[in-house]
Image: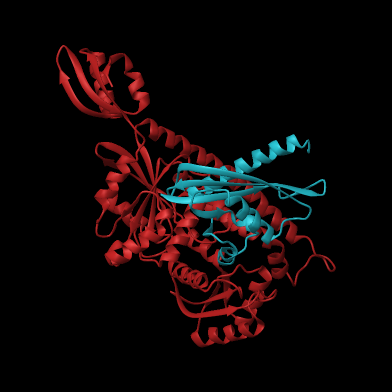
Chain colours: A cyan, B red
Amino acid sequence: MFPIIAVDISGRHRINKEYYMVCAAVAVDVSASHIESISQIAIKPFLTTSAPDITDVVSIIETTVAGINYPGTIVVEHGDLYNQPEWLSKRMFSREFKYQESLSERLAIEFAHHVSLSSRNLLMKELSID
Amino acid sequence: MKKTIVVQRNDPNADDASNERKLAELKELAHAADYVVVGVLVQSRYPDRKYQIGRGKVDELAELVEALDAEKVIFNNQLSTTQIYNISETCKCEVMDRFQLILEIFAARATTRRAKLQVELAKLHYELPKARSIVSLLKKEERPGFMGLGGYEDSYEQDIKKRIVRIRAELLHSCKGSESLRSFRHERGFSLVALAGYTNAGKSTLFQSLVKEGTIVEDMLFTTLSPTTRSLTINKRRMLLTDTVGFIEDLPYWMVDAFRSTLDEIFLADIILLVVDMSDPVDVIRQKLAVSHDIFWKRTEGAVIVTALNKTDLLPEEDLQEKLDVISYLAPHPVMISAISDKGTDELKQLLYENLPKWEHSRISIPMSEEGMSTVSWLYDEGIVHTIEYGDSILMEIEARDEIIQKVKPFVISS
């Protein structure tokens, strides 16, 4: 089993001149094709006035992952880091980092995506923003 | 065998190892299409609109063609019609790109009606965006009317579109046929196992070794184009093993689409037997496994993946373990085998058996009558009969899938 932290960011589009983003990090143990156990979930909201660039995305991910008390490699979708080559992205993180490869890593990212999206939906509802 | 020169343009910031791998794959593809590679030309630059590679490099290529007496030039990069025209004018020989080469191999190997239709569909998809320029280049001298620019181009494009629609309808019809065949096989108590993996990973050799039967096995890419299915029995459980077309890197989406019905054999299986060539460098294995996972993602319907790490006879034990450690996060249920020497096939069969859809055990008592005897015969066909005792009634210990157990539920003593 391999410990990973799958991360997804929802809301990287402008609403009312602002970017209401929610980042979710899920610490899971995976085998090659399945999620075997879930250890912890961390969710953090972020508000910016300009579109997030690559360094903002790295900082958002790092801040959210800091709330996880378990070890693991950060796993992110290619598109989240603007399809930057892996060797370059690796150098921008203070922890182990990789893009998704196996079925289980994709599954974990899908899980993180549902968490971030539904948390953001809840937040937007609370703030009465459509 | 035709002499050919392979050409590759690399992007300046592309990874060297990946470039080398792509070039090696192109050479293997050329070999599979019965060409002899007599020369290689590589250039690192951004694409040229007219020639794909630089003008000077094309002149160099023309000299190479003449010196080596090559009959064909194969590019690893996709070429536009104008680029093909310009390069062939300079080199004075036939020019094609990687996709045309793949289509040529597919066309030569397609034997069934469905495979032939799939190849034609892929060809038409490839030709469609080029239709206008092909015709305008061919009919340069004889355009209809004064400075006319229409006529031929439009009708040729329309013909291609109509043909695509017709083939799609026919393929859809033939797909429905194979899907119902699959459910029929399930109903007959067969579990479905599909071999998947990259071209030349040894799928056909493993298939042959498992079913002990002669299918064409060659050290070439794409020897299997149409799926072949044979039955296999492990510990009395019957299964159907299907050999399928191999995956290939950077296969364009229209080609994947055209071969979907062939790949469906993999996606609808109960177990996917993913064959990996362990003699490849570890980075290549990792890359190939990642692409395989990408292909399976959201397409397999709850299938269990078993990874057969093949060609282990070509490597020492320490190297194998080292490679396995690196790729283990991408290899579900791994098992080391050598299909050519039958090493590890028993272990693989056991692993396949353990991962088959679960069957239920039950003890039943059937009344001794003509109807009872026909039920016994039916149970022998549909499941596994472990014990049978004939007395006032027939006592049986059976193992079968849930639907069968449900049908004999009134006779169940214990499960």
Q: Quadrant of the C terminus of chain B?
A: top left
Q: Which residue is pictured at 35% across the width and 19% down the height?
A: B407
> In the image, is B163 to the left or to the right of A70?
right
Is any atom of residue B295 visible in this view? no
Q: Which residue is pictured at 75% across the width and 72% down the height?
A: B141
Percent from the top left, x then y, of residue B152? Answer: 74, 61
Percent from the top left, x then y, of residue B379? Answer: 27, 25
Q: Quadrant of the N terminus of chain B?
A: bottom left
Image quarter for residue B414?
top left
Percent from the top left, x then y, of residue A80? Answer: 63, 55
Pick whichever, B139 or A8, lies toward us: A8
Is any atom of residue A20 visible in this view? yes
Pick whichever, B38 or A78, lies toward us: A78
Q: Which residue is pictured at 34% across the width and 24% down the height?
A: B404
Q: Which residue is pictured at 54% across the width and 71% down the height?
A: B15
Pick whichever, B361 or A40, lies toward us: A40
Establish if B363 lies above or below A17. above
Establish if B187 lies above or below A56. above
Establish if B296 lies above or below B12. above
